[in-house]
């Protein structure tokens, strides 16, 4: 994989998709329908998916591509592939809360090596550089070339006073009970893959997810967090979260800054 080209193409496609998503987001009305799993889908999901898929297939024709909106046509597992969630946080999009993201990642041998997370309504753009280090680009974002890139890194956590981020739309009692086992200074809620990015920038120390997710929900944020020095592990045995699993479904997981003393489940 040409990582210089990959970084350039992922950035441009994420920004282009973000523009199309925001055109729909600010419109007077847009249709929402339910997919077979009862999750919502909008025109923005489909338009962004088509745009990103076409760009990736044209540039990297020999690399397998997996996207949320085309999941039914995918095989059951893979080792090396591009993976896309064109609009993560559709519930936040529909409710006009702004916590939605465009996500593109590259997975090699089960590890998300490169990724980009763009939150167009928040004006935040996080991605890995060609060498794997993660940055947040400071807007406004020009399509032709990156602007100021601020290196990001995870916090040095204080286990007596952790900053915790949890899901805005999928918070439950099991998550609250798990968080209660830590020394928590403060807690915040965020939607979509932004939670990974808050850990990556040091704005949070710990993000536990005790609920169903798919690999396209997490791969880009996972790559950004890893590039910032963070870790993502399975909830049950604390082994690294891997990608390319049959069906592309994730187990429960924990994303955190090294130094957080994980509680055993």
Image: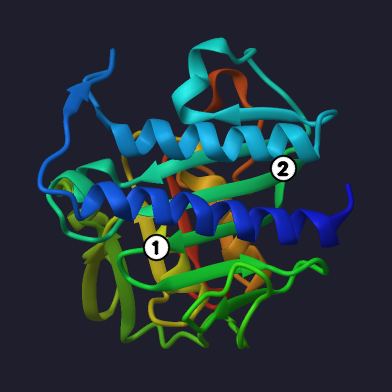
Which mark sits nearer the N-terminus, 2 or 1? 2
Q: Dot 2: within a 10 Å radius of its alpha carbon, few (fewer than 14), some, or many (20 or more) residues?
A: many
Q: Residue at x 58, y 59 (%)?
A: 116
Q: Which mark is residue 119?
A: 1
Q: Which residue is mark 2?
A: 107
Number of numbered callouts drawn: 2
Secondary structure category for the residue under label 1: strand
* Quarter of the image where one finds residue 3: bottom right
* Image position of 51 with respect to 121: above or below: above
User: Residue 160: percent from the left, percent from the top?
Assistant: 33, 86
Tell me the CA gap for discs 2 and 1: 21 Å
Q: Is residue 5 left or right of residue 33?
A: right
| Res 79 visible | yes
* Quarter of the image where one finds residue 46: top left
Q: In this orientation, which residue lies closer to the viewer: 166 or 169?
A: 169
Q: Dot 1: within a 10 Å radius of its alpha carbon, few (fewer than 14), some, or many (20 or more) residues?
A: many
User: Residue 37: percent from the left, percent from the top?
Assistant: 28, 17
Confirm or deny contact between disc 2 and disc 1 (CB under 8 A): no
Tell me the mark number nearer the camera, choosing from 2 and 1: 1
Q: Residue at x 47, y 80 (%)?
A: 140
User: Residue 12: percent from the left, percent from the top?
Assistant: 62, 58
Q: Which mark is residue 224?
A: none
| Res 232 visible | no
User: Residue 7: percent from the left, percent from the top?
Assistant: 73, 60
């Amino acid at each position: 994989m040409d990582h210089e080209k990959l970084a350039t193409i992922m950035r441009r496609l994420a920004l282009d998709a973000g523009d199309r998503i925001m055109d729909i987001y600010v419109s007077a009305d847009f249709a929402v329908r339910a997919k077979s799993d009862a999750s919502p889908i909008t025109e923005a999901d489909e338009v962004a998916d088509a745009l990103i898929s076409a760009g990736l297939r044209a540039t990297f024709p020999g690399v397998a591509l997996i996207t949320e909106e085309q999941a039914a046509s995918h095989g059951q597992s893979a080792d090396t592939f591009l993976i896309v969630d064109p609009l993560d946080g559709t519930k936040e999009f529909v409710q006009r809360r702004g916590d939605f993201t465009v996500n593109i990642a590259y997975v090699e041998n089960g590890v998300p090596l490169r990724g980009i997370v763009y939150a167009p309504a928040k004006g935040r753009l996080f991605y890995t550089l060609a060498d794997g280090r993660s940055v947040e680009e400071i807007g406004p974002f020009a399509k032709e070339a990156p602007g100021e890139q601020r290196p990001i890194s995870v916090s040095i956590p204080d286990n007596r006073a952790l900053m915790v981020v949890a899901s805005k739309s999928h918070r439950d009692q099991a998550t609250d009970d798990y968080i209660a086992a830590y020394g928590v200074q403060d807690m915040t809620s965020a939607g979509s893959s932004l939670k990974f990015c808050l850990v990556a920038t040091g704005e949070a120390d710990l993000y536990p997810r005790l609920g169903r997710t798919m690999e396209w929900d997490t791969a880009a944020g996972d790559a950004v967090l890893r590039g910032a020095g963070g870790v993502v592990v399975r909830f049950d045995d604390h082994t690294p979260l891997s990608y390319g699993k049959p069906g592309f479904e994730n187990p429960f997981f924990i994303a955190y800054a090294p130094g957080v003393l994980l509680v055993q489940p």
